[in-house]
Amino acid sequence: MHWDEALRYCADLNNSKLEWRLARRDELLNYYLHFGALKMNIVNLYWTSTTKPGNHQLAWYLIPKLNLLITNPKQLDGLVLCVTF
């Protein structure tokens, strides 16, 4: 899904007990470093909620297979990791 769809998808998971959101860049990287090899689809990219400073057309994403955290245009497709707080 596109970046804006990813944001909405996580927000739509909210219920009376939990609030969900798309993981920030630091949260996604931390999750990947601790659990990525076991829990993530390593051939796809995962969106973060973090927009690139100075260029709001780009957001950070993680490509586990390449061990790479970079930015990409928000209209490209990616996977989602929602977190609760």
Image: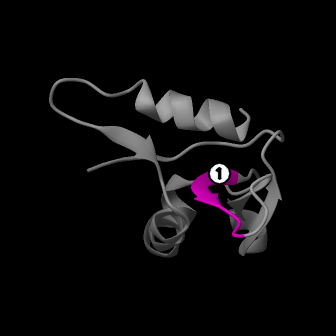
Mark 1 — residue? 47
Residue 45, percent across and down? 73, 53
Is 51 or 3 nearer to us in this picture? Answer: 51
Residue sitting at 78 percent across and 64 percent down? Answer: 71
The residue positioned 66% from the left and 35% from the top of the image is 4
The residue type indicated by label 1 comes to: Trp
Magenta span main SS: strand
Q: Is residue 44 above or below residue 12?
A: below
**In the foreground, 8 or 27:** 8
Furthest-front residue in view?
A: 54
Residue in view at x 26 percent, y 50 percent: 85
Q: Relative to residue 51, is residue 71 drawn left or right? A: right
Q: Position of residue 41 (x, y in %)?
A: 64, 50
Magenta span of residues: 46-53
Which of these two is toward me, 81 or 7? Answer: 7
**How has the structure been colored for display?**
one colour
